[in-house]
């Protein structure tokens, strides 16, 4: 009759607990790392660094004629002196007043030209002045016709040559500029005057031109039609209309305030900027030119003259463009920094981005780029410019950022300056534009290749990964892959990003939650099946997803065509890796197999990992175990491969077979070919690779539940090897070997083998050495001893006097103490182990202790349950 404790033990699961419905905690997952179904790890595919910095590397699928150039010549002539906005094409409304050619002071209108009534709103005054200024400039170039035709005699009086200077009535005209001060006439009389492109005078020094500034108003010193218009407007009041007088008073005050500001700007320009420009024009030494550029940048920044609204901007740009031909990289960076700060656009923006790109192609210039803070200006271009109109400029700007992102010294700076946000914003814009228009932007594929290559470098930083997760970047990148599936370079870059990100659990969860990713990955595998560099990364990503998420295993397994796609890929690369040798003729020695090809072998390693991880899911595992194609490919790998040549592949294949052998289903191919599998495992047991030995022992732990395998183990003396492994100072090795011995002890005819090699003593030693800290191993040892002592009549005769006494004392002490855990374990993990120490180990240990104590003398044997080790 069974005792209550024996009945309780009879109901216990022999080794593995049934799976519970609730989701397991992270502590439980960690603690069950030695379970029969184990995930398999592997290294991330290696990406060699490009020897040369190019937009598209040597491995690019783009042909030279279908991609932008990485090498080009750039000279000053490539820049445009004018950087105005392009014509919008909008039709302008007609002006209220048609401009007339200026008449002679002797006409009927009197000495002053009467202007029409100005509007009361100052903003309208400014808009009208700006419009009229453009009209006067057009007239000076001969593009504006008068509103009426004058007689020849009158035209002779009113129209004068640009190259003449007319004096009298306090009016001076020089190249279309009116001066209204008589003192200025006397001063300018002695100088030959020419009007330059920016409205200034050349041929004399500005210091000489503006001597006696007290007698020459600032608006005249700045030159241009604006000064002419103001002088005429202020010198001809019309007193017949009171409202006009009031409006003129407001306008005059506004103009005086502007004149004061312009006078200050002119003084700063003449005293600070002009001398630097002279130095830039005359200096030939590159270092001195760099110093002058730095000085110019500081001066412009000090007076807020950077940007588009500076009136002498064209003069500055024209001077800077000329220096591009000097050919000095440090000087070119200084020039590029200034040109970008002046907010150029269109062709000039493209060329300055090309200039920086050309410099950044040399790694030795990275320190120059970092010291000059060019990165911030490049990011500002991406942030503020319009993508649709500056795609090519964005391309070379991104090319530069991609180059320097490969330098670890730039990583933190780029992330802190918002590079991740800027890039993802651009990617989102491109996705939305493609979704709305149905077509991709021109050159957007080239640009996305640079963006994704940059992100690939940035995701090495934990901060960048956190930002990408918070922004929902992974679905956006999947959308890019779907829209640009024909662009292999782009898909490869995104696959490299995912292969880095999915090495982390939170990133795996984020990608796994995007359910469309599985179909996307399968489509890419089918499209690029022989493109190893892309497909191996996609398979690696799938391996990461299925290793960390049971939901991902189920979703991928249920995706249409998932397993056939993997098998097709496995078969393709098996043929590449396992090339059959031609049969040798009679009398010829059979040639040895060729050394495996590294790329194909790496693909097989990743594929077996996916299959091993999928097998953890009960539905997928049972289906894979029943698939002749899957099992056939795995066994073929073990047949042709040696662990000395292909260690990772052989170990992963054995681990996959171990997971499949866990499922005791009727149509299991593993069970049908169990003896063939056992024969293949013998090669691993006798190898010098301990990882390979461990995997083989684990498979024997599952297969040894079958009587035929137990007979095979005894016949091949495998049991002696298992007993010898109990001496290994390796807990996992002892654990797996003990599982095989536990199953052998179920058979009464084979229990005696435990004594032949000193198995009982070694089991007791394992319990003493590892029991206090490893409840799983301690429980397994007690179950093995329980099976061994099933029909004993005397404990001493069964275990021996010494081992019986040692075991009795050891079990008593273990039952009275708690599981000893290291302080490195977190509290949840400690609680988990202590719970199973109480519920799993102590009941078995107590029953074994009772059996030993009650059978120290002769007693009738009691029927007891037998434990089977159903997995290891």
Image (cartoon, rainbow, N blue to C red):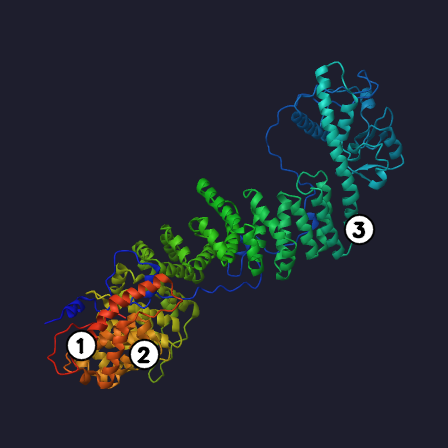
Disc 1 from disc 3: Cα separation:
106 Å
| x, y percent for residue 232 | 78, 24
Say whether disc 1 or disc 2 marks the residue closer to the N-terminus: 2
Q: Earlier in the sequence, mark 2 or mark 3?
A: 3
Q: Does the image show residue 776?
A: yes
130 versus 70 height, above or below: above
| Residue at the disc numbered 1 | 851
Q: Secondary structure at mark 2?
A: helix
Q: Nearer the viewer, residue 285 or 659?
A: 659
For the point 90% across and 36% down, the residue is 190
Q: Mark 3 packing: few (<14 Cα in 10 Å), some, or many (20+)?
A: few
460 in relation to 595, above or below = above
User: What whole-number distance in Å separates the C-alpha atoms at marks 2 and 3?
Assistant: 82 Å
Q: Position of residue 576 (x, y in %)?
A: 39, 68
Q: Residue lying furthest top in this view? A: 240
Residue 814 is drawn in which quadrant? Answer: bottom left
The N terminus lies in quadrant: bottom left
The residue tagged 3 is 282
Mark 1 or mark 3: whose residue is earlier in sequence: 3
Whether pointer 1 and pointer 3 mark residues with C-beta atoms closer than 8 Å, the reply is no
Residue 678 in sight here: no
Instruction: Quote the CA–CA distance across marks 1 and 2.
Output: 35 Å
Is 637 displayed left or right of 867 in the figure? Answer: right
575, 766: nearer the viewer: 766
| Residue 216 image offset from top left, x and y in percent | 83, 32
Judging depth in this view, the residue of 198 and 498 nearest the camera is 498
Q: Please say if the residues under marks 2 and 3 sit with CB atoms less than 8 Å apart.
A: no
Question: Which mark, residue 685?
Answer: 2
């Amino acid at each position: 009759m069974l005792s209550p404790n024996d009945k309780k033990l009879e109901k216990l699961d022999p080794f593995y607990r049934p799976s519970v419905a609730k989701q397991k905690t992270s502590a439980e997952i960690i603690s069950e790392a030695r379970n029969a179904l184990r995930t398999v790890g592997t290294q991330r595919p290696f990406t060699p660094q490009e020897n040369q910095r190019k937009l598209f590397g040597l491995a690019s699928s783009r042909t030279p004629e279908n991609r932008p150039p990485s090498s080009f010549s750039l000279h000053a002539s490539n820049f445009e002196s004018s950087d105005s906005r392009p014509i919008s094409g909008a039709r302008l409304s007609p002006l209220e007043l048609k401009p007339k050619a200026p008449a002679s002071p002797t006409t009927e209108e009197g000495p002053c030209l009467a202007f029409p009534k100005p509007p009361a709103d100052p903003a309208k005054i400014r808009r009208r002045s700006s419009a009229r200024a453009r009209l006067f400039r057009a007239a000076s170039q001969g593009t504006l016709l008068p509103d009426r035709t004058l007689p020849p005699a009158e035209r002779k009086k009113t129209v004068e040559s640009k190259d003449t200077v007319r004096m009298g009535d306090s009016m001076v005209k020089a190249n279309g500029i009116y001066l209204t001060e008589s003192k200025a006439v006397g001063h300018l009389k002695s100088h030959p005057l020419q009007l330059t492109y920016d409205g200034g005078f050349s041929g004399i020094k500005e210091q000489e031109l503006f001597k006696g500034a007290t007698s020459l108003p600032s608006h005249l010193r700045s030159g241009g039609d604006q000064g002419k218009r103001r002088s005429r407007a202020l010198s001809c009041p019309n007193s017949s209309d009171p409202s006009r007088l009031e409006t003129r008073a407001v306008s005059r005050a506004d103009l005086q305030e502007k004149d004061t500001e312009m006078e200050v700007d002119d003084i700063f320009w003449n005293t600070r900027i002009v001398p630097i420009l002279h130095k830039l024009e005359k200096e030939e030494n590159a270092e001195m030119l760099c110093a002058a550029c730095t000085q110019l940048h500081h001066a412009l920044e000090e007076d807020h003259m950077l940007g588009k609204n500076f009136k002498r901007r064209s003069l500055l740009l024209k001077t800077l463009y000329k220096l591009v031909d000097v050919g000095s990289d440090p000087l070119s960076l200084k020039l590029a920094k200034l040109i970008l700060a002046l907010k150029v656009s269109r062709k000039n923006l493209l060329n300055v981005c090309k200039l920086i790109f050309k410099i950044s192609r040399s790694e030795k210039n990275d320190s120059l780029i970092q010291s000059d803070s060019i990165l911030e200006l490049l990011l500002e271009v991406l942030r503020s410019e319009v993508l649709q109109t500056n795609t090519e400029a964005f391309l070379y700007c991104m090319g530069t950022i991609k180059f320097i992102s490969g330098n670890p010294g730039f990583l933190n700076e780029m992330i802190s300056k918002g590079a991740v946000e800027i890039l993802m914003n651009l990617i989102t814009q491109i996705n939305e534009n493609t979704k709305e228009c149905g077509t991709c932007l021109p050159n957007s594929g080239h640009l996305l290749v640079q963006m994704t290559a940059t992100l690939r470098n940035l995701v090495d930083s934990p901060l960048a990964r956190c930002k990408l997760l918070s922004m929902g970047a992974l679905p956006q990148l999947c959308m890019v892959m779907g829209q640009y599936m024909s662009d292999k370079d782009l898909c490869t870059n995104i696959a490299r990003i995912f292969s880095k990100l999915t090495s982390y659990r939170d990133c795996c969860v984020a990608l796994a939650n995007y359910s469309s990713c599985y179909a996307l990955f399968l489509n890419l595998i089918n499209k690029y099946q022989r493109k190893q560099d892309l497909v191996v990364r996609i398979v690696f990503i799938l391996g990461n997803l299925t290793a960390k998420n049971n939901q991902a295993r189920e979703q991928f397994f249920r995706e249409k065509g998932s397993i056939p796609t993997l098998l097709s890929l496995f078969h393709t690369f098996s043929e590449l890796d396992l090339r059959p040798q031609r049969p040798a003729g009679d009398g010829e020695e059979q040639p040895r197999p060729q050394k495996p090809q590294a790329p194909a072998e790496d693909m097989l390693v990743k594929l077996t990992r996916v299959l091993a991880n999928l097998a953890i899911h009960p539905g997928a595992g049972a289906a894979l175990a029943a698939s002749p194609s899957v099992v056939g490919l795995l066994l073929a790998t073990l047949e042709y491969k040696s662990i000395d040549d292909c260690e990772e592949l052989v170990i992963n294949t054995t681990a996959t077979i171990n997971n499949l052998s866990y499922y005791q289903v009727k149509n299991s191919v593993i069970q049908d070919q169990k003896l063939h599998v056992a024969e293949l495992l013998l090669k691993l047991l006798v190898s010098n690779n301990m990882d390979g030995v461990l995997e083989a022992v684990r498979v024997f732990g599952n297969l040894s539940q079958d009587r035929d395998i137990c007979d095979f183990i005894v016949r091949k003396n495998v049991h002696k090897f298992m007993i010898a492994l109990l001496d290994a100072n390796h807990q996992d090795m002892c654990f797996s070997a003990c599982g095989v011995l536990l199953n052998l002890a179920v058979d009464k005819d084979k229990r005696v083998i435990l004594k032949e090699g000193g198995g009982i003593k070694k089991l007791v030693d394992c319990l003493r050495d590892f029991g206090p800290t490893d409840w799983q191993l301690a429980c397994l040892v007690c179950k093995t001893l329980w099976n061994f002592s099933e029909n004993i009549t005397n404990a001493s005769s069964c275990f021996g006097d010494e081992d019986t006494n040692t075991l009795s004392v050891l079990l008593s002490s273990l039952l009275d103490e708690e599981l000893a855990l290291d302080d490195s374990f977190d509290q949840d993990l400690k609680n988990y182990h202590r719970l199973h120490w109480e519920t799993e180990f102590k009941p078995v240990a107590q029953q074994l202790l009772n059996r030993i104590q009650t059978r120290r003398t002769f007693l009738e044997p009691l029927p007891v349950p037998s434990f089977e080790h159903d997995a290891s």
